[in-house]
Amino acid sequence: MAIRDGYKCYVCGRIVEQGECDHIVPVSKGGKTEMGNLGWICPPCHADKSEREAAEAQGRNVRIKARIGVDGWPM
């Protein structure tokens, strides 16, 4: 996964060697465990995404503090 994606986080675009493989569409929402639904994600983005998905599952909204992308703009 990391090699396919060039170690680039699919959320923020940063290059990170210590990333993780992530389901782009969560399994809980019908996402499949197949190459087209897997992407390389950096740990901060993965933590934000997991927190947001857990909150959605509990029926509440979570505001995640905006981070700055590689292009210098808020994400």
Image (tube, rainbow, N blue to C red):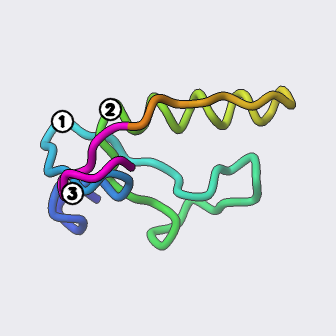
Find numbered disc 2 in the image and state the secondary structure of the residue it sits on.
helix
Amino acid on which the number 2 mark rests in the picture: Pro
The CA distance from mark 3 to mark 2 is 12 Å
Q: Which residue is mark 1?
A: 18
Q: Are discs 1 and 3 less than 8 Å apart at CB? A: no
Would you say 17 lies left or right of 45 here? left
Q: Is residue 32 found left or right of 34 in the rendered image? A: right
- Magenta: main secondary structure equals loop
- Marks 1 and 2: in contact by CB < 8 Å? yes
Outermost residue, right side: 59
Q: Secondary structure at mark 1?
A: loop
Residue type, numbered disc 3 = Lys
Q: Is residue 33 above or below residue 67?
A: below
Which residue is labeled 3 in the image?
A: 8
**Closer to the observer: label 1 or label 3?**
3
First in sequence, mark 3 or 2: give its number.
3
Which range is magenta? 67-75
How many circles with numbers are drawn on the protein? 3
Instruction: Name the mark nearer the viewer: 2 or 1.
Output: 2
Answer few, some or many: residues within 10 Å of disc 3's Cα (few below 14, many 20 plus, some between 14 and 19).
Answer: many
The residue lying at 60 percent from left, 30 percent from top is: 63
Image coords of residue 61 (percent x, y): 74, 31
Q: Which numbered disc flags the more N-terminal residue, 1 or 3? A: 3
Q: Mark 2 highlights which residue?
A: 43
Q: Residue at x 19, y 51 (%)?
A: 72
Residue lying at the far front in this picture: please name it. Answer: 73
Position of residue 32 measured from the top left corner of the image (x, y, whole percent)? 63, 62
